[in-house]
Image (cartoon, rainbow, N blue to C red):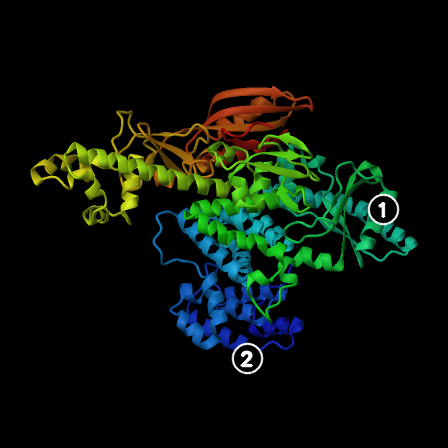
Amino acid sequence: MSLTSVTGIGQLIEQVHSYCPEADETIIRRAYEFSAKAHEGQTRRSGEPYLQHPLAVAGILTFLKLDETAIVAALLHDTLEVTVATQEELRAQFGNEVSHLVEGVTKIGQIPFQTYEEKQAENFRKMLLSMADDIRVVFIKLADRLHNMRTLEHMSESKQKQIAQETLEIYAPLANRLGMSWMKQELEDLCFQYSKPEAYSLLKLKVARRGEEREEYIQSIIHATREALAEEGLTGEVDGRPKHLYSIYQKIERQGITFDEVYDLAAIRVITDTRVNCYAILGLIHSLWPPVHGRFKDYIATPRTNLYQSVHTTVLGPQGEHIEFQIRTEYMHRLAEYGVASHWRYKEQTRVENRDEKVFSWLRQLVEWHRDLSDNRQFMDSVKLDLFHLDVFHDVVFAFTPKGEVKELPLGATPLDFAYAIHTEIGDHCIGAKVNGKIVPLRHPLNSGDTVQILKSTSQTPQREWLKFVRTSRARAKIKHWLKVEEQKRGLALGRRLLEREFRRHNLPAGELLTSNDLVQVAADRGYESLEEMLRMVGYGRLSAAMVAGQFLDPAVRAQFAQADAKGSVTWATAPKPVKAVKVLGGRDVMMQLSKCCSPVPGDSIMGYLTRGRGLTIHSVGCPNLQALDYEKDRLVEVEWDSQVEGNHSVKVCVLTVDQPGVLANVSSAIASSEANISRAEITTREDQKAVLDFVVEVSNILHLEKTLEAVGRIEGVISARRIRGWEGSR
């Protein structure tokens, strides 16, 4: 779905009046004039006046048919960030509601963050929490991101890839979560275009060529469907919808197939008047062409969490090709295209808690996560995981409590996920479950229709091992929160014992000092927010108990600790030289090694994890092993790649090819021509006449790796070429 870009205030007002004739034209013009004055003299990278951006954002919101308040906020959404305008001015001229929306959308550029990832995590956290208060915040933010993506060609190549990746991970799935399929698809295709330009151009060309060949075939299916509907007296509009490029690319990558093996490049959509007719039309289509086993999904009876409703079926059409049908009512169609925005009204109340329970349960969950997960990265990772499940796992599991209450879970979810979906307390004390009357272990995968009875014990507590098999972000967040709290308790108790022992060793009154204001002052002097925080650092081994106790000794005795204190609080074991390509923020010289599980290379976002006596292990930020440990925040250390140091890094690469002579030689030649060295190679032939080539290659950085993979991907016979992490397997 596309929409015309708004370029003038007259056009904007005209579009607002087309769906809301009673809208106040005066306040919209005032907002436009305020924005024009605030942004006067500012231009975008394209050279056009900056004012065109908020105008375009407001225009996108008219396509969603949002109210005048949201339109006004869209026109003003950048005034607090890039102009001298203040929130007090906005509040005085446009009211509290508009001011609140603009504040929710505004980025937090004033806060000094150590890394780009940390800044983006904080920005995203604020946006989502504002969204839980008034969902119009995220509508404006999504429209802002969409227009930025449409004009991304004016940015540098590295910035294009960075913004495209962020959009693909967060904003496109978020649009999907809110049911706005057209926006999700456009964002994905734009991300695909900038993140993988060569693959995008090649696929676009292939689809165009195939489209010309298949147009007549698709039209014949549409014509046959229309005739059958007329003969049966069923109401229904029938049309063909081409699938967007990124979804085709995903299918090729996930299934390991060639483009020529993709048949369903288009879906046939039937829009009717009633739910009953949806099922009647389904039966009619199955009478015309045989259905493909396992390709039927009823999202009318069990809607997705984003309210999407439709009946999906795939049939074996003429010439033996697979044809996908989507059958829905007009109301369902509006929901599918516009999502939450299709029925949102602001006349009465804007608070979430009085809206549709199913839509906004996820938003209320965000607030809960906000309380439990103090670290921005943890919060963002939990949200991303939840978005990922909805976006990728279209096949969800509907399991039932013994009382018949249904719980929607992602494919692969376990009884433990089910327990946490009911209540945190039930999840924390879960020891097993009965599924359909039979006792099963906690990691047992659930199927749709299962009745699940949770077995619990007050003596049971969350285990670190649970993080390895739970599938829902809620369960993962709750487990991490419990482990973090327990780790803090243990660290506090151990720190107190160690310090008490140190006090007694120096014949100091341990009981008195541990509760004294003097010890509180020592904690403050060392930069800790509380005495408890300092004690935890002692318990974690990051602060020496002797150094703390030394503050209460005579100056002559205390001097012997000064030298040790200047070197830092952690005693490191004798070790090889630090990894030269990585440096610790703050400049501390410690031993470190790159993690073998994720094999990070320069360009990957990285984080160090402190292991006593072994120094730092450097992980990629997305590494599951790091995520399983990130509740121990005090052991995470900020690190970054040293751009001044060059070197090669080992990366595992998997290439899926057609099994034919000469392919290995061509792949090896492509890797060599990319100036990457092969240190190991392994070949496996599959039964489906395809071959898997596993390599370990030496590359200098992530861009070098991407260029190498792109060179391999261009070879005839190569189906896919991708990086393999330690937790992944070859296909």
Q: Secondary structure at mark 2?
A: helix
Among numbered discs 1 and 2, the one appearing first in the sequence: 2
Q: In the image, which disc is placed on residue 283?
A: 1
- Give the residue pinned by disc 2: 26
The one of 496 and 393 positioned closer to us in this rendering:
496
Q: Residue at x 72, y 57 (%)?
A: 333
Q: CA distance from mark 1 to mark 2?
A: 53 Å
* Mark 1 element type: helix
Above or below, 581 relative to 368: above
Number of numbered tags placed on the structure image: 2
| Residue 563: % across, % down | 15, 35
In the visual, does 180 lie left or right of 213? left
Quarter of the image containing the N terminus? Answer: bottom right
Res 414 visible: no
Residue furthest left in the image: 556
Question: What amino acid type should be assigned to the residue bearing mark 2?
Answer: Thr
Task: Measuring from the top left, give residue 620's x and y in whole percent.
Answer: 43, 36
